[in-house]
Image (spheres, helix red, strand yellow):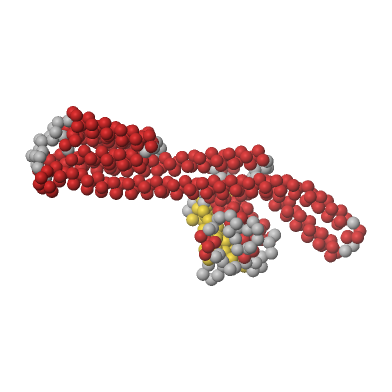
Amino acid sequence: MPVKMEATKQQTGITHTKAAANVEYAAGHKNMAQLIQLRWIAVVGQIIAIGTVILGFDVKLPTVPMLEVLACLIAFNIASQLRWHEHREVTNGELFLALLVDVASLTAQLYLSGGTTNPFAFVYLLQVILSAVLLEAWSTWTIVAITITCLDGLALFAKPLALPLDHARGIGSLYVQGMLLCFALIAALLVVFISRIMRNLRAGDAQLADLRQRAAEEEHIVRMGLLASGAAHELGTPLATLSVILGDWKRMPEFSKNAELIEEIGEMQTQLLRCKSIVSGILLSAGEARGELSAKTTIKHFLDELAAEWLASRPVQTFAYQNRIVHDLPVVFDSALKQTICNLLDNALEASPQWLSLEATRDGDTLNVLVSDAGPGFAPGMLAQLGKPYQSTKGRPGGGLGLFLVVNVARTLGGSVTARNRAEGGAAVQLSLPLAAIALPPQEERVDE
């Protein structure tokens, strides 16, 4: 059994590592989408700038080569959009390459339009800041070195832009106006896109924190499973001994002549059988004898049988059971799901021994199981911490594990658990599960038919 539990822990670790990688890839995909949007803005901005400078200020530019560079940038952006629409995994190297293309395109346009005398040469800062936010440290410093080299090359080899040297005019200077426009453009783009990128990063961090919390909770469940399985093995021998002793007592003359004692022995044997059933259920949930006890059934029969079995062994005064499932569905009997619903009922029974209800409904492809009671309800703080271990109002060591296990089993099956306080008093806990998690595969349905 320790070997099985260790394997389960290793598998859980692998699953969460993959999930963490998926979160990082998702954040990278969103950041790549932001770069693609920014590149479309750059394309539109360059078209407007070239047209304005040529037509509005009568500045002569090599229009054809500049439009060729712009066409290459458009082609690269269309290819990027098609590729990243299909592939969601984006690495640091791919983001680095995308920014290098942007730097190369900007360098080519500046070389054709005045080099460092073009006031839009400061757009390099946009690439540097984006790299600092998006890339690893070595990639960012590489972008810094490349942009400095490009600026040096432009200062050495590019032909100056034919603008009047009228800096003394201040705001009336065409160069100063270009610088102000460049600053406003960079500032606006940085505010918009850095805000979006940081939102993506924060969302990714929140998802990673949630995954770490789940990993810790599932490791806790694995440890509990190990202890429960070990306890079940250890309890097997004393339970068998008690069964033999009770059988001997029943046949002894001293007891057989006393009807009251015989009745009590019979009750003890009944409770002993229940203990053995619980132990068998623990071993089943731990993975032992699963193949022997699994069975095919329907969701209505599964719930009807569960409700009848639970009611037969619990001292509840009034149990209102309503199975509102109209369209039945073949399912595979799941001991974990059975124990989950029983945990909900047991918690409700402890809070409200006089009355509780179980209502089952089907909403499309979702199974909803609602357990209600007439007890004191949940404290506001408990509703906020629903599903956390050891959150309980019962005041005993180990309390709160029932709902903790319910929430984690539901999450493993792709479902959810919600809780609320009823207006008429008491609490209501709803378990929602996708039927696909327990539905019988179509191939097996056809074989059975």
Q: Residue furthest top?
A: 157
Image quadrant where one finds the C terminus: top right
Can you give x and y, in whole percent of width and height, for residue 197 in the image? 35, 46
Can you give x and y, in whole percent of width and height, for residue 206 in the image? 45, 49
Q: Residue at x 13, y 48 (%)?
A: 171
Above or below, comparing residue 185 to residue 107 in the picture = below
Q: Residue at x 29, y 39 (%)?
A: 127
Q: Residue furthest bottom?
A: 424
Give the left or right position of residue 400, taking residue 210 as reference.
right
Image quadrant where one finds the N terminus: top right
Along the viewing direction, whichever of 293 and 86 lies nearer the viewer? 86
Give the left or right position of residue 327, taking residue 319 as reference.
left
Q: Residue at x 48, y 48 (%)?
A: 209
Does residue 439 appear in the picture of this structure?
Answer: no
Does residue 375 appear in the picture of this structure?
Answer: yes
Can you give x and y, in whole percent of width and height, for residue 62 in the image? 13, 32
Above or below, comparing residue 175 to residue 396 in the picture = above
Along the viewing direction, whichever of 72 and 352 lies nearer the viewer? 72
Can you give x and y, in whole percent of width and height, for residue 21 in the image? 46, 40
Q: Residue at x 25, y 45 (%)?
A: 186
Residue 382 occupies quadrant: bottom right
Q: Residue furthest front?
A: 168
Along the viewing direction, whichever of 284 and 404 lies nearer the viewer? 404
Give the left or right position of residue 398, taking residue 196 as reference.
right
Marks counted in the figure total 0
